[in-house]
Image (spheres, helix red, strand yellow):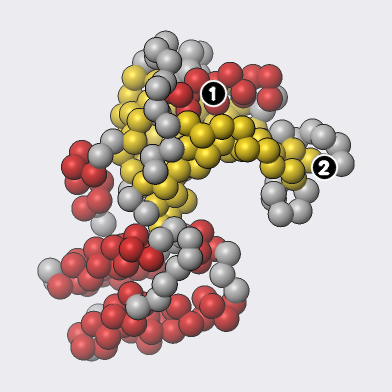
Amino acid sequence: MSPRTSASALALAIVCGCAPPRTGPVQEANVGQHHVRFAVPGHWEHLDHGRAQLFRNGEAQLRLIDLGPVSAEAMVSRLEGARGLWLSGRRRDAFERVRRLDSPSLRDASREQLATFWRPWNDVADAPDAADSAAIGRAFDAMSERRFVNGTCWDVYELWNLVSHGGRVRVAFTVDEGDLLALTTDRGLDGQLAPAFTSLLASLEVLPPTTRTSALQAP
């Protein structure tokens, strides 16, 4: 359900730490670029899907997901990581890293904006092995010049259908090192989802960058 078309949003809270005691098993996971620690709600199972962490209880499901870079600095950091792979001789890994580049800024961009962003890269991306090194370097430079508009505090919202007042969805966002991390209710009855959402959010710890080196180095 899109909050732009059929939902109304209510800011519920800003969560900045001070979590209550955990009651479930404590686990750690790499969620895309983020490394987090959390307590799985009682009677729920945790499924590690890399960029998306799923929490299920029967048909009910919560999702913790890395939505990608939301600042210019974070986008440039991703591109510099790909450039580093290229300079180390891992050309195909570098091209794959750029191919998988994603962010809210790109998802919400117009067709013209997307064409402008990808234009420097398209000429070299069609034939990675044959592309001239100087051309690849210029493409990285051109893409890194783009600027994207956009705490460890969480902004928490509740969304619902304006007509039926049903379809309730809970969403929490935080920006960590320039990347957007979100916890959402995917499916299920709100009476079952709400306590688990609150419990999981209260237990979430986004760990400092020094603990996530291995995740950031993965191609």
Q: Which residue is drawn at 20% across and 39% down?
A: 211
User: Which quadrant would residue 138 be assigned to in this image?
Assistant: bottom left
Q: Residue furthest right?
A: 163
Mark 2 or mark 1, which is nearer the start of the sequence? 2
Label 1: element kind:
helix
Measured Cα–Cα span from mark 1 to mark 2? 23 Å
Given contact means CB atoms under 8 Å apart, are the residues at marks 1 and 2 in contact?
no
Where 140 falls versus 5 (above or below)? below
Q: Residue furthest left?
A: 88
Where 206 falls versus 4 (above or below)? above
Where 162 falls versus 91 (above or below)? above
Residue at mark 1: 198
* Res 185 visible: no
Name the disc covering residue 8, or none: none
* Res 9 visible: yes
Report x, y in % for residue 95: 30, 70
Residue type (three-letter) at the residue carrying disc 1: Thr
Q: Nearer the viewer, residue 58 or 158?
A: 158
Report x, y in % for residue 207: 28, 36
Report x, y in % for residue 107: 54, 63
- Dot 1 crowding, Cα within 10 Å, few <14, some 14–19, many 20+: few
- Which of the image's four quarters has the C terminus? bottom left
Asked whether, in this view, residue 196 is left or right of residue 79, the answer is: right
Report x, y in % for residue 61: 57, 30
Residue at mark 2: 162
Residue type (three-letter) at the residue carrying disc 2: Leu
Where 214 falls versus 39 (above or below)? below
Q: Nearer the viewer, residue 154 or 191?
A: 154
Q: Which of 13 and 208 is in front in this view?
A: 13
- Dot 2 crowding, Cα within 10 Å, few <14, some 14–19, many 20+: few
Q: Which residue is drawn at 41% across and 57% down?
A: 69
Label 2: element kind:
loop
